[in-house]
Amino acid sequence: MQKNRKLTAWGINVLLLVSSSFLFALSQPGFLFPTGLPLFAYFIFIPLFLLVRRISFKTSFLWGGFYGMLNYCIFSYWLWGFHPLAMYIVALEYFCYYMLTIPLLKAADILFPRFSYIVQWLIWVAYEYIKTLGFLGFSYGLVGYSQWKWTPIIQIASIFGVWGVSALVCFPSAWIAGAIKEHCTEPVRCWFSGFWAFARHERVAAVLWCCCMIGSLIFGVAVQQSAHQELSTARIALIQPNSDPWVGGIEAYKKDLKTLKSLSQQAITENPGLALVVWPETAFIPRIAWHYQYREDRELFELVHELLTYVNEQSVPFLIGNDDAVRDLTNGESLDRADYNAALLFRPKENVLPPNPERYRKMHLVPFTEHFPYRSIFPFVYDALIANDTHFWEKGTEPVVFSVNGLDFSVPICFEDTFGYITRRFARHGAKLLINMSNDAWAKSTACQYQHLSMAVFRAVETRLPMVRATASGQTAAISPYGYITAMLPPFTEAFLCTDVPILQEQSQTLYTYWGDVLGIFITLLAVCLLIIGFVRAILRKGKTHEKNR
């Protein structure tokens, strides 16, 4: 009988873990619902917080590890197409993250019997902030991003960043789980028996959340209604070649260039007066400046020359994603290269022949697949990455602002538009337009591309800057400063999108641009302080109990 009870309890725990993982995945863009089900996000952590109550502190480490691994294997399943090691690395990374986070949630449950739901809520938002930091920083899966299509709600990102939206969305899960969990170790039919008593005791917190939600909606509607101001515009052509990034060789490069030229020429012909033509990240793979200068490979030089001749004959500037290679001067007279993932701005008749483009070099590289700075510490990891055909880049350092035809813009490259601090730097340096160039074609997944788009929407709202995205296969789109998708191409098609972007007269001055991720930092510090207070109080109580028993 005892064995059956343990087996039943274990089965319920597994069901809670799996259901929370699936609800998490369904709330975000995924394989079943390409744009996600944002309403689910308000309830996805109820099973998790109930699981935390049911398990012991000792076993919480293992339960947490498996929860994290399952979460990201379901949510980011498309990583299997990115790199042979990518899914294993992310699964291990999130096994470790949750192996630390779930025990902290359990500690909050033990240390704060009445108000554990508040501390757990703070811990979760703090975890979301911390996981975006450093070399392993990965913004995919923040619960706030699930709201990307509900534009009234996300307007508070212009004040608090995505952290404000995450805090708003996470709270109902914590509160409802708090109302249920007092009886969640009993048979399932008893779980809700204390719900209304809890609701009466904790009604102030619920009312405050309702006020915050209503206030956010009112603010969102108000700022969107005030957005209708007449501004002069400039038309930009965004090229989507639908190229396969893993197909190399001179013939593939020729085919890609032919497609890019054809789409660009059609856009230019049909739209006189274009201000700019934008090609995606590494749209043209041969290193333009390097092959033109050193001419090690005649075929590649001729292809580069064909590209430059075409661009120089046009009447519109071109922004092209390319590997910007320079000689590594640390190696004397050798032709060793330092490679940068870059955006190159070519102005016909000015800096095309010989090529001397204006440059922006990607500052935040993708961990493991674009950048691994720990070769001396983990040589076996570095060797495994190299053996699996990884191409490393050098990091850029300057948040460049380009100026052309009345547009002052910066170019977050691919992964960079998933981090608010980067677009904030661009805005503070004077950018009045964000042009993202991306290549997510490797994933062969619409869900992956929508997940990326959902984060880009927040970058526009946070900075109140219009954003356009030129991608290899999707989602090529135009985003208003208020998060609306004003135009978008179908994914996985050869096409171009010509869109009018507003020419802002003044620099963006949102509160987020001014103070950045201060809410994420504040919540993290508050969660840490509360946990320390809880541990100290528990130790003191244990000491007093020990003294009484002597």
Image (tube, rainbow, N blue to C red):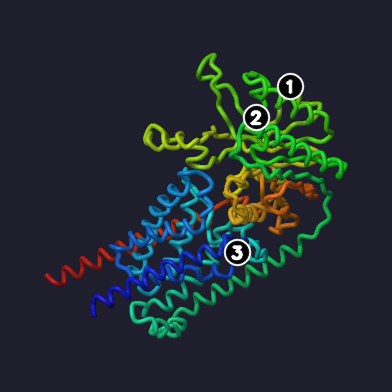
Give the numbered dot on residue 85: none
Position of residue 526 measured from the top left corner of the image (x, y, whole percent) = 44, 60
Position of residue 270 measured from the top left corner of the image (x, y, whole percent) = 86, 44
Residue 523 in view, yes or no: no
Dot 3 falls on a residue whose secondary structure is loop
Which mark lies nearer to you, 2 or 3? Answer: 2
| Residue corresponding to mark 1 | 354
Q: Is residue 293 left or right of residue 99?
A: right
| Residue corresponding to mark 2 | 250
Residue 528 falls in which quadrant of the image? bottom left
| Residue corresponding to mark 3 | 33
Seen in the picture, residue 113 relative to 226 is either above or below; the reply is below
Check the picture and name the quadrant holding the N terminus. bottom left
User: How far apart, in angstroms, are the residues tagged by discs 1 and 3?
Assistant: 48 Å
Position of residue 66 measured from the top left corner of the image (x, y, whole percent) = 38, 59
Residue type, label 3:
Phe
- Dot 1 or dot 3: first in sequence order is 3
Q: Residues within 10 Å of mark 2 (few under 14, many from 20)?
A: some
- Look at 62% across and 73% down and name the residue there: 214
Position of residue 310 measured from the top left corner of the image (x, y, whole percent) = 79, 30
Which mark lies nearer to you, 2 or 1? Answer: 2
